[in-house]
Amino acid sequence: MNGRHLLLVIGAEARAIYGRASAKLAVVVALLTGVVVLLALQWLQGQAETIQANGNPITNMVEFSGPAAAGWALRVRNFFVLPLVLLLATAASFAGEIGDQTLREVLVRPVPRWWILLSKALVLSSLAALTLLLTLAPALGGGLALFGAEGPTTTGAVLLGYAASLLSDVGLIALGLLASTFVRSVGGVVVAMMLILMGDMGLRVVLKGMAWVGAAWAEDVGRALPGAALACWEGWQGEWDPWAFAGMAVLLLVGFGGTLWRFQRMDVP
């Protein structure tokens, strides 16, 4: 076993993951997000005389620049659909392969299980990076061509937001893989993750309430929970929250570490 064998495993995993409908959907949605946001901003700019609030034209309320277009595209991309599609791709690559017995056939090969898990994590992360690039390219490139670069939003800040968003996507992939070791169906993984994140949101609301009545520690704990960690990319719009990144470090350790521990010990039917 050497590096060449590992590359062959990664290549086989890439063909499997990128060949599924979930990965193709992620690519299409990512590209459409950047294009649609750019076209929407162009349309709004052309409606400056007709869309007003208290006598102020839309051009005074919305920033029209290339970096701003990329920022809006990132917000739309991370709102709901793309994270859900990435979660579907993650569940299909593990829980789905258990269900259709593809993973059992892979495990017959004389390769360590951690190679298989590493290959899945790397390919899924590359899919996340590709979707970010496909959203960024038309939004930023087209925005610079249509609106220019001047404005409060800077290109550097937006690019940091996209980089942090990749970290958030990898964190979501880690959680999805871990859930796949407990819930062995694609739909079950998605439902389980949604319930976990809803519970996380409720817990953060409770912790905010505790902080409001005087428990100073509660707010810091809430800022490090998985839901806050997955939203660490939002810091590009203002201040970066170190607690969110600390939570992300814990999430990645627990997600990938827990998945590896369970995968090494689980029976794959």
Image (spheres, rainbow, N blue to C red):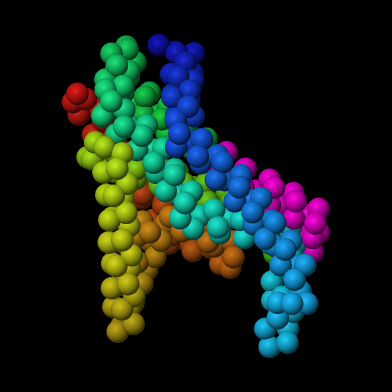
The span picked out in magenta is: 130-152
Total labels: the figure holds 0
Pick the residue in front: 195 or 168. 195
Q: Residue at x 64, y 57 (%)?
A: 37
Q: Residue at x 64, y 51 (%)?
A: 34
Position of the C terminus, as image quadrant, is top left
Q: Is residue 150 magenta?
A: yes
Position of the N terminus, as image quadrant, is top left
- Asked whether residue 176 appears in the rendered view, the answer is yes
Q: Is residue 32 above or below residue 48?
A: above
Q: Quadrant of residue 149?
A: bottom right
Residue 212, horizontal then vertical, whole percent:
34, 82
185 vs 84, left or right, is left
15 vs 223, left or right, is right
Q: Is residue 82 above or below residue 79?
A: above
Residue 39, horizontal then vertical, whole percent:
70, 56
Residue 227, horizontal then vertical, whole percent:
38, 59
181 vs 33, left or right, is left
Q: Residue at x 80, y 57 (%)?
A: 146
Q: Is residue 194 above or below residue 117?
A: below
The residue most toward the front is 50
The residue most toward the bottom is 54
Q: Is residue 4 above or below residue 30?
A: above
| Prevailing secondary structure of the magenta residues | helix
Residue 40, horizontal then vertical, whole percent:
67, 60
Q: Quadrant of residue 230?
A: bottom left
Q: Residue at x 55, y 57 (%)?
A: 76
- Asked whether residue 152 appears in the rendered view, the answer is no
Pick the residue in front: 108 or 37. 37
